[in-house]
Image (spheres, grey):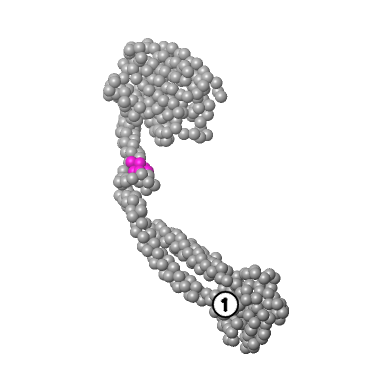
Amino acid sequence: MPSRRRRLVHWYRSRSLRGRLTFLSAAAVAVAIALSALACWFIVEKQLYSQVKTELLNAPQPRGVPSVLYCASSPQETPTPQGASPSEGNTPFRDVQFVIAKTGQVCFLERGGRAVLTEPGDTQAYHLKPGQSIVRDGSYANGDPAVIRISAVQGHNLGPVLAMVATPTKSIEDSLQGLAILLGAVSLGGILLAAVAGRLVAHSSLKPVDQLTDAVEHIARTEEVGTTIPVNGDDEIARLSTSFNSMSTALANSRERQTRLIADAGHELRTPLTSLRTNVDLLIRSNDTGRPLPPATKTKLLGNMKAQMQELTVLIGDLLQLSRPDTPKAGPNLTVVALHEIAGRAVERAKLRGPGLAFETTVDPWFAHGDAAGLERAVINLLDNAVKYSPPGGTIEVRLQQGVLTVRDHGPGIPPDELQYVFDRFWRSPSSRQLPGSGLGLSIVAQSVREAGGEVTLGPAQDGGPGALATVRLPGGPAPE
């Protein structure tokens, strides 16, 4: 049995989805039809036998024992005439079998009467009182099935006598057998029709899945992400199609961003690498030709190489920072961060980079939940951006109040038509492309703030004066908890 079950499971799992749906639908219909057919057969059987037993119980009972009976000690013996006491009345039945309780003799109204038998060991009939009746399933002596009514009759000098009247049920069993054959044929036809209908339903239901499969295979074969399939309705298949279209569009956008990032990174890396290669080639050529460079020129050249290496280091660090998912997250790196302490350290660092600038700082305690290193780099990038664009001797205002950090410089500001691009990767204003930088600083700010559940904006100063105003809003509170 376990081996047969394993083979059945293996066969089912090796089928296609369409084959499984066809099999399951046909099996479900087969079980339903089989149960319905069995229920119908048993109901008809019960109704037919109940009707026969009811008619038999309602039939007139013998009022007494006839004066002459043909008796034998068993139904198989030839009955012989035997006198009985005068009856209390003639029975309206001619084919009635009488059983004398005290002798066990079986008697009939006529010679050659048909004997009827009940189940062996059925002794309840001997405890019946005159006028009481019971109905039993039995048979004739020749084996034909019958339903028997047993009634108690007082036979005077014969003692208690059981009058047994039988109704043949062979016609009922023949009808039930024919009904079983008919129900079996109808069930088989219904199962075949269910299999065909299940095949058609599976084909129609899985058509969107076939389209989805074709689209996935097309993407796997051609790597053309962005392929979509039509969506019809709002059922589960439609939801699956919508989810696939969203995933395909997201993959296309991701590939586009990746391609753009690689192109922009290659463009930004080309400049320092070209400068480094030129300087290295110049040093090698001077040594190969035996004409060493003047010490001042060599020192300047090495200084430029060091500056280019630092620019490469910063650029690679920025790229690694931006390689993380650009969505809010929760993990072991997220802790309670003292934003006012981060702002204080960032201001001290900015003072070193802009020694001639004045800083006006107003910082209130504020604690946020986020990545401490990422938020510190974001604040430093904002201050570095303010230092870069501030005029000599200018003022940078830094304020942290109620979870809102603002950094305002008094530089040239940002043109209104460029505000929508300031947080894009590698974007640099045309007027500031001669300044050092890779165009990734504000992108890192936006990503770090979003990871902490906050938001950042950059725009003109609210008082209408010169300069730009960067605003960072982070959820949190004035206390660590």
- 318 or 413, which lies in front? 413
- 203 or 213, which lies in front? 203
> How many marks do you count on the picture?
1
Q: Residue at x 45, y 70 (%)?
A: 179
Using the rendered view, name the quadrant where residue 294 is placed.
top left
Mark 1 highlights which residue? 93
Quadrant of the image containing the C terminus: top right
Neighbour tally class for label 1: few under 14, some 14-19, many 20 plus, Cα within 10 Å: few
Q: Is residue 97 left or right of residue 252?
A: right
Q: Position of residue 392 (x, y in %)?
A: 35, 13
Depicted 416 relative to depicted 228: above or below: above
Q: What secondary structure is found at the residue carrying circle 1?
A: loop
- 446 or 22, which lies in front? 22
Q: Is residue 164 left or right of residue 28?
A: right
Q: Position of residue 403 (x, y in %)?
A: 47, 20
**In this picture, which residue range is highlighted in magenta?**
242-249
Q: Position of residue 145 (x, y in %)?
A: 55, 76
Q: Residue at x 62, y 69 (%)?
A: 134
Q: Residue at x 41, y 18 (%)?
A: 407
- Is 248 one of the magenta-colored residues? yes
**Most prominent secondary structure in the magenta stretch?**
helix
Q: Could you tell me if residue 144 is visible in this image?
A: yes
* Residue type at the position of mark 1: Phe
- Is 274 one of the magenta-colored residues? no
